[in-house]
Image: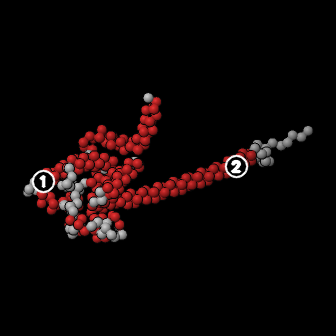
Amino acid sequence: MRGERAVRGPVARFARREWGPLFGTVRAGLVARKWRAVPMTLAAVCLTALFQLVQNQDWGYQPVQDIGSVRAEDPLWLALLRTPLSLFVPALDLPVWGALAQVLLVFGIAEICLGRWRTLAVAFLATLSGTLYARVGIALGPDGPLGPLGLPAADARVVDTGPSAAVVGLAVYVCWRYRAWWTGGAVVVAMVVEVIVKPNLAGKEHLAAIAGVLVLIAIQAGRERGRGQGQGQGQGQGRGRGRGEGESRAEGEGRGEGQGRGEGQDGGSEPRPGTRSWKPPITS
């Protein structure tokens, strides 16, 4: 029992430190609003399920490809136009329940912790980073300056859809925002191991999505640091002005008290001749 308690103590402290703020925020949101806390997530799950159902029909495969399928060989303007919807089109070679679970869990946590629009913005940034990386990687090739992160020309015809890049990017961003450093590091390490074990387009796009989100994090951290320094300087100047005003008031009060004491001493002097209070000296 003592051994279990000794182990449970550090584990519990680590869990509270790592996931406590995140868990508290998610729990409070769900308790207060229940399913109304994640309307965007529920809509994304339904849209993903709808695309999966339609694209597996003989009549629905091509329409889904026309509005949500992205390939590196497509014109850039067309790929950018299709990228938002490509996030919700499940990959045909992967089980759809995996995509639905990813969207429900990660998008739901992000929507509660970050808000609806920031969640969508980070998700689209991560997806767009992977889409643009595919073009750069194919253009440079496997023997180019990117080294092993370069892509063969055959990858230009690979269909690039699904929420996985957005899920990875959101996970890293939420971990940074809530200081879950070990969890965020584990996500990054898992994606690196994925590329080492299976160096395909999807795995490398996950790394590109992480890189895009890390750039966003660096920009936001720099802005927050600058804002914090500005507030600290403003507070210091305010304290300096308050200290100066206090010293001025103290000096003024000191001068006033000195004058009052001088007047009191003058009032205590002997009456001068000619005044009512003056009395002639008594002589014997």
Where 230 falls versus 10 (above or below)?
A: below
Name the one closer to the observer, 205 or 119.
205
On the picture, is 30 further left or further right than 217?
left
Q: Which mark is residue 258?
A: 2
Q: Earlier in the sequence, mark 1 or mark 2?
A: 1
Dot 2 amino acid type: Gly
Where is residue 90? Give x, y as percent: 20, 54
Residue at 36 percent of width and 41 percent of height: 24
Name the one closer to the observer, 154 or 168.
154
Would you name the residue on which mark 1 appears? 56
Q: Secondary structure at mark 1?
A: loop
Dot 1 amino acid type: Asn
Where is residue 40? Give x, y as percent: 24, 49
On the picture, is 81 further left or further right than 212?
left
Residue at 27 percent of width and 61 percent of height: 201
The quadrant of the picture occupied by the N terminus is top left
Name the front one of labels 1 and 2: 1
